[in-house]
Amino acid sequence: MGISRWDSLREMEELLERHARARGVTRPAAEPLPPGRSEHLSSAEWQPVVDVSETPTAYLIEAELPGIGKEDVRVSVDAGVLTVQGQREPANDRDKRRYHRRERASGHFTRSFALPEDADIDHIAASFEAGMLAISVAKLAQRRNRGVEISLG
């Protein structure tokens, strides 16, 4: 029998996706294209693109947040879950433009990540520069995990 590695970050992402679907929050279904159109135009659900990686000493989370100011981003940790929240304001429509295509989403966003057991929440650093948010979560020097024999009763 092989050993499977548990990916807590992937499991949390799947849980959040199932929760969103249960609440009825889904991406709009594509409508049939009108004659002569080659592409469906729809508004996107606003969710920043994120890379999650790890080094021998830390977990790294990098998020693309173009058009957002540092003051509009909040990073927090609660009960082992790191959350990134923010707001991107819509383009100013003072000139009453008629859009033919609008692909840049705006509004509130939230991304949450379950931290592994060896994440040291007392040593988290974040920086924001040129629309990129970089978060580094240090790993504990000694893992808290230990093997336990479980008897079958």
Image (cartoon, rainbow, N blue to C red):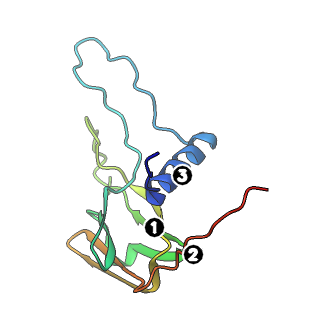
Relative to residue 145, is residue 99 drawn left or right?
left
Mark 3 burial class by Cα count in 10 Å: few <14, some 14-19, many 20+: some
Residue 120 placement (x, y as % from top left): 45, 83
**C-beta proximity under 8 Å, tags 1 and 3:** no
Mark seen at residue 26 = none
Q: Amino acid at mark 1?
A: Gln
Of labels 2 and 3, earlier in sequence is 3
Residue 52, relative to residue 17: is it above or below? below
Residue 142 placement (x, y as % from top left): 44, 84
Q: CA distance from mark 2 to mark 1?
A: 13 Å
Residue 85 placement (x, y as % from top left): 45, 67
Q: CA distance from mark 1 to mark 3?
A: 15 Å
**C-beta proximity under 8 Å, tags 2 and 3:** no
Q: Amino acid at mark 2?
A: Asp
Q: Nearer the viewer, residue 84 or 123?
A: 123
Mark seen at residue 16 = 3
At 36% from the left and 34% from the top, the residue drawn is 42
Q: Amino acid at mark 3?
A: Leu
Residue 123 placement (x, y as % from top left): 41, 87
Q: Secondary structure at mark 3?
A: helix
Mark seen at residue 78 = 2
Residue 1, relative to residue 108: is it above or below? above
Q: Secondary structure at mark 2?
A: strand
Q: In the orientation shown, which residue stands out farthest toward the right?
A: 153
Mark 2 burial class by Cα count in 10 Å: few <14, some 14-19, many 20+: few
At 46% from the left and 79% from the top, the residue drawn is 143
Q: Nearer the viewer, residue 19 or 57?
A: 57
Mark 1 burial class by Cα count in 10 Å: few <14, some 14-19, many 20+: some
